Every structure is written in structure tokens, then in C-alpha cells.
Image: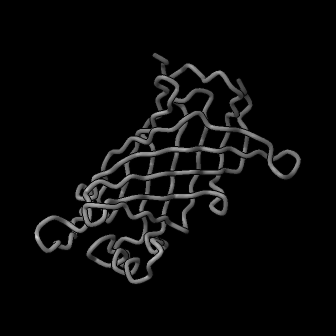
Amino acid sequence: MSTATEMPARDWVAGTWTIDAVHSHVGFMIKHMMVSKVRGHFGTFSGTIVTGATPDTSSVEATIEATSINTGNPMRDDHVRSADFFDAAEHPQLTFRSTGVRLVEGDFLIDGDLTIRGVTQPVTLTMGPPEFGPGMEEGTGKAGFSATTEIVRHDFGVSYNGPIPGGGAALGDKVSIELEIEADLVSEAESRS
């Protein structure tokens, strides 16, 4: 088993990165009517990623604007923004702040605090090894991060559910989250491995 201080066998750039929202995707999926899955994404988000000299010195902070939700249906999106779900008027942002990063069996496990609707719960993101490459201009750099997690929406006070005639629930309780993040290098740390 890999430990927190072992690095993956690939190029690694230690530095500070800002999320490039234009080339990133923050998506989710939830069970609908007990038979299918509905996908959606957020259009407005920002954040900073620090890749440390070792995984355990890395960190992530991100903010998502609740009103930027898009499920492909404006009426549904307005409902999700309402007090039945995000209550975006009172809680306009979803936030994530990492509390630790571990490297286990080749995967990066990013532990952190996720806040939705003013309720904060611990979550763990599972991420494969990041990709590093050159930017469009000399002296710049790009990084790519792909991560997933699953949360229980009731844990965050998002408990609305419409009944289905004959029994059942309109929405599932578990929400799968998918992140495809491209980030721009702000400053590179002195040491590289």
C-alpha cells in the first residue's frame, strides 16, 4: 500500500493552481422516479489547488454558485434553487475545503468539508493521478484533475421529495458527483520530483 509521502511514478509539478472554469466540469447525477438518472452541472465555480511536494501537503478550496445549476430544464432548475432544495437566496454558495490528502493504492483520497445549504459534512473525493502539461504561453502550465464522490443529500438538509402515486419517491437520496478540472499554474514551488 502506498503511503501519504510516496509520489506516483510520473512527472509531478508542485505549485499553486487556479481552476479554469471554462475548461472544467462540475457535474452530478441523481436517481429520478426510481427508474432513471438525471444529470446536471454547475456553470459558475472557482477554486485554488495546491500540489505540495508530497500529497499530504496538498490542498483544495472551491466555491460553487448555487444559482448556476443547470439540469437542462429551467423550471426544474428554479425549483432546485428554491427553499425546497438549495435555498440559494439564503445559501448562495456550496463550498469545499480539504482537510487532508492521502495516496492509497495509486488513488488520491481528498478528505474535506463540503457545505451545502449552510450544513457542513465530511466527504472524501477519489481522484486518479493528476496530469501536468504546458500552457498556451511560454512559462505557463496546466494541470488536470478527475475526481468523484457520492453524498447523501439528506445529510445536508436537502430533504424535499415528491411522492409517486402507488408509493416510492421522486428522487433518490444519493447524489454522485463528477469533477473534471483543468487548472492554470499561478506559481510553481521551488522543488520538483
Can you give x and y, in whole percent of width and height, for residue 166 in the image? 11, 70
Front residue (pair 189, 171): 171
The N terminus: image quadrant = top left
Q: Is residue 150 left or right of residue 159?
A: right
Image: 103 above or below 128: above
Using the rendered view, name the quadrant where residue 92 is placed. bottom left
Q: Position of residue 135 (x, y in %)?
A: 80, 48
Q: Residue at x 51, y 38 (%)?
A: 127
Locate the C terminus by quadrant.
Answer: top right
Residue at figure coordinates x 45%, y 45% from the top left? 148
* Frontmost residue, 116 versus 28: 28
| Relative to 14, residue 138 above or below | below
Q: Could you tell whether 108 is left or right of 164 in the image?
A: right
77 or 140: nearer the eye? 77
The percent coordinates of residue 36 (x first, y second) are: 34, 61
Q: Quadrant of residue 173?
A: bottom left
Q: Is residue 40 above or below residue 149?
A: below
Extreme residue in the right direction: 138
- Residue at the (45%, 65%) spot, across then down: 40
- In the rendered image of this protein, does residue 65 appear above or below residue 186? below
- Does residue 60 appear to the left or right of 182 in the view shown? left
Quarter-of-image position of residue 187: top right
Going by the picture, which residue comes out furthest to the bottom?
75
